[in-house]
Amino acid sequence: MAKEEQDKILNEVTQSDYKYGFSSDIDTDSIAKGLSEDVIRLISSKKNEPEFMLEFRLKAYRHWLTMKMPEWAHLDIPPIDYQDIIYYAAPVQKAKLESMDDVDPEIRATFDKLGIPLDEQKLLSNVAVDVVMDSSSVKTTFKEALAEKGIIFCSFSDAVQDHPDLIQEYMGTVVPYRDNFFAALNSAVFSDGSFVYIPKGVRCPMELSTYFRINAENTGQFERTLIICEDESYVSYLEGCTAPMRDENQLHAAIVEIIVKDNAEVKYSTVQNWYPGNKDGLGGIYNFVTKRGICEGVNAKLMWAQVETGSAVTWKYPSTILKGDGSSSEFYSVAVTNNHQQADTGTKMIHIGNNTKSTIISKGISAGKSNNSYRGLVKVVKNCEGARNFSQCDSLLLGDKCGAHTYPYLEVHNKSAKVEHEATTSKIGEDQIFYCNQRGISTEDAIGLIVNGYAKEVINKMPMEFAVEAQKLLAISLEGSVG
Amino acid sequence: MSIDTINNDFADLFEQGKSLLEDNSSKFMNTKREEAVEYFKKLGVPTLANENYKYTNLVPAFDHPYTVDLQYRTVIGDLNELFYCDVPELDTNLVLLSNGWYYNQNRELDIPKGVIVCSLQEAAEKHSEIFEKHYGKYAKPNEEGLVALNTALAKDGVFIYVPKNIVVEKPIQVINLLRSDRDLMATQRNLVVIEENAQAKLIFCDHTLTHNKYLSNTVSEINVAKNAVFDLYTLQNQHLNATVLNSVFIRQEANSNVLTNTLSLYGGMIRNNHYTLFDGEHCENHTYGMYLMDRQQHVDNFTFADHAKPNCVSNEHFKGVMDDDATAAFTGKIHVRRDAQKTEAYQSNNNLLLSENAVINTKPQLIIDADDVKCSHGATVGQMDDDALFYLRARGIHEEEARMMLMFAFAHEIIEKIRVDALKDRIDELVEKRLRGEISKCNTCAIACNQ
């Protein structure tokens, strides 16, 4: 293919703008900028929280004050002024809504633009959606159907009001507030999130889904998700995000905690497509997430699947602690970076129980002037017999100004462990494109085909609804791709 | 003792020993020395907080009242008589160092005209033009505390110069003998300059001749010019009380070919820093290493392949076998810089754990800023293949013996890369003995010494 043509296509890709950029005008109830103990007290009182929550927040805040922002990641982040952020914003709401018609038409229009017809979804796709719009739960659907089975699926704030015993027992057990800088920040100021409880022996009949959106200007969104799966239960949880276009960087620091007990199984899927900033690297979301699950019981299973295409900066390592004997975990990830995006993402697999297994498949695709890093840890502790891990981290480079980096850490303290890691870095083969061209497939389509094939292993692991969206996102992120 | 006390002690040593350190050293070295002292004050001895030293705690190794020789100490007895290398058919140019200092009664060498092998001190005075062109240019005292420490204390070591178009057939073998009646910290600084189209093979051996506690901090700078071919074999075989800190900085010019093989057979704590800078196109580099560790030994191999220019090929392979309470770490960094297109870089690290308490930490890393590259890395940790074991058992081979055969085959993959036949055979033999536990129980040097 001619060099100019390649450049032209490359230009098109790297200049394609964010398609989901719009912001909806909803009245928001915000508090003043800045962070202090008073702000935390105010958040806690606005949310009408019990005493133990306020104590937890204050402890976390005091600890956060002693911490420094981590600098080890392969990321170039301008200093963040934590006093220049509004820590609480909730859409103004009159009363709890019972039917779809009661939902603010503005909000509904927003979701329609995103192609998520909430009302149709309810009927057709059998998906319960707990919508988080700027930190406060707007609407929970299918709640009653789930309640029949004893499943609790509600916003974190509701859970604090209705099930304080469960929150007190499990919150902070997987990601303690001391864990890291952003976890401490989140623990201090988190506004809302989702709560899932699956009782013993129950198979959740539908995919649980939450759409997080960052909406109000200058609002950091700090949500917190807690999923508890009792013995022999099963749940598939979907998390998807798109955010409107903004010029200023928005901070996002979330925590996800998952507890999986004996023979239970959790699938956690994410599609993340927050605003990545414009072509010149201006604006975009800073995404600092701590996601961790613990396979507490025997033969527990936890699967992470993620498609990351958005955010200016991504700092995210969904991890699993394999504590129960025979427990297993899988991590599938596709991370796409374009323009000036930076992603440092990966996983941690901590093998503690005997005969635990983990699989890591990570696919990085970098274009433009972006940097994409895989950073992962596989740790086998001394008394863990028969651990098995397989990791594969591939990087695909589109363009000569981008970077792909791999930082795996393998720490093995037991001789019976079998740990394998392999990684490759390459660009799309000219021969592959030629092969497609020869068969009448345009270069653009060929790239799409190859990239989708490259990511297929991961996308296949996602639930149907997400797989479709994920493929769309890949196509948008790398539209009319390169050779 | 805390790390601050150790760093302060060194700072005091630079202060008090200044005149002794500068005495007998060239002005050029002393200028570098002064810079390095300042760098060291900033950096200090690397601690666990340093990501590159995450798995190796140097503080206990440094926390000991070592003697530091700031001047050449006269050797009692004739080292040539005391020590000889008994590797059969290994005909080398033997150069002896005593505690890092060039031995003043080294025998005459059989080397082509124009080739210089002498002490670093002598080179700084007599061959100042070559010396000053290269000394302190490749090692980075501003980035690495150990290099700063070495540069601040360095007075001697070996200097090798191979002029244009000269091929040195006979390998040059540099043996550093650690022999002292007190616990000693040795500082050795080497400079190797291989000019265009020249060829040479170098073997570095370290031996401990007495049972004292040793800490040796060695830095070698090697420049390999256009079309030159250079081999470096490093044999590490000390006793359990020895700490070896060995940093090698290689700069390759266009079309050069370098092979290094680092064999760690025995030693209390070993840390190898191996830097390769590809500063010309079409370079070829092979970096190999093997470590056989048992008891409480610790080995940490850190490698950094810096692909600054396009069209270079690098191939890296490290293998290790850990037994008893041995711990090992491996860090392999490949950095392909922007515009270093058509780079091929491969890296692999395989480990066998034989006992309950053995530990391996491995970090193979790729940092890639160019798109038209072929890079891969792999790391494995495991035990012996049960099928292979069964195959051998089915043919009437005793389990012990079968394991030995598999282990030996595992290690042989690295040994066979040695391009000096006599050395290869000898290492094969050594490794076999070592794996059978025959040598590991002996605390004196293994290659051979008649003590």
Image (cartoon, rainbow, N blue to C red):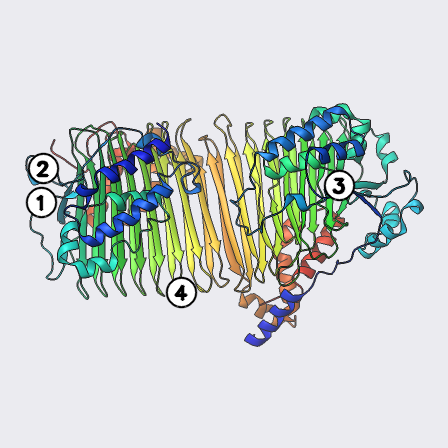
> In this image, B141 relative to B106: left or right?
right
- What subunit carries mark 4? B
Alpha carbon of mark 2 to alpha carbon of mark 3: how far? Answer: 76 Å
Question: Looking at the picture, does residue A351 appear above or below residue A133?
Answer: above
Q: Which residue does the numbered mark 2 point to in the structure image?
A: B75
The residue shown at (50%, 32%) is: A380
Q: Earlier in the sequence, mark 1 or mark 2?
A: 2
Q: Earlier in the sequence, mark 4 or mark 1?
A: 1
Disc 2 is placed on an element classified as: loop
Same chain, marks 4 and 2? Answer: yes
Q: Which residue does the numbered mark 3 point to in the structure image?
A: A88
Across and down, in percent, residue B206 comes to 21, 40
Q: Which residue does the numbered mark 4 point to in the structure image?
A: B311
Across and down, in percent, residue A255 comes to 67, 38
| Crowdedness near tag 3: few (<14), some (14–19) or many (≥20) residues, C-alpha within 10 Å | many
Disc 1 is placed on an element classified as: loop
Q: Nearer the viewer, residue A37 or A403?
A: A37
- What subunit carries mark 2? B
Dot in front, 1 or 3:
3
Q: Nearer the viewer, residue B114 or A437?
A: B114
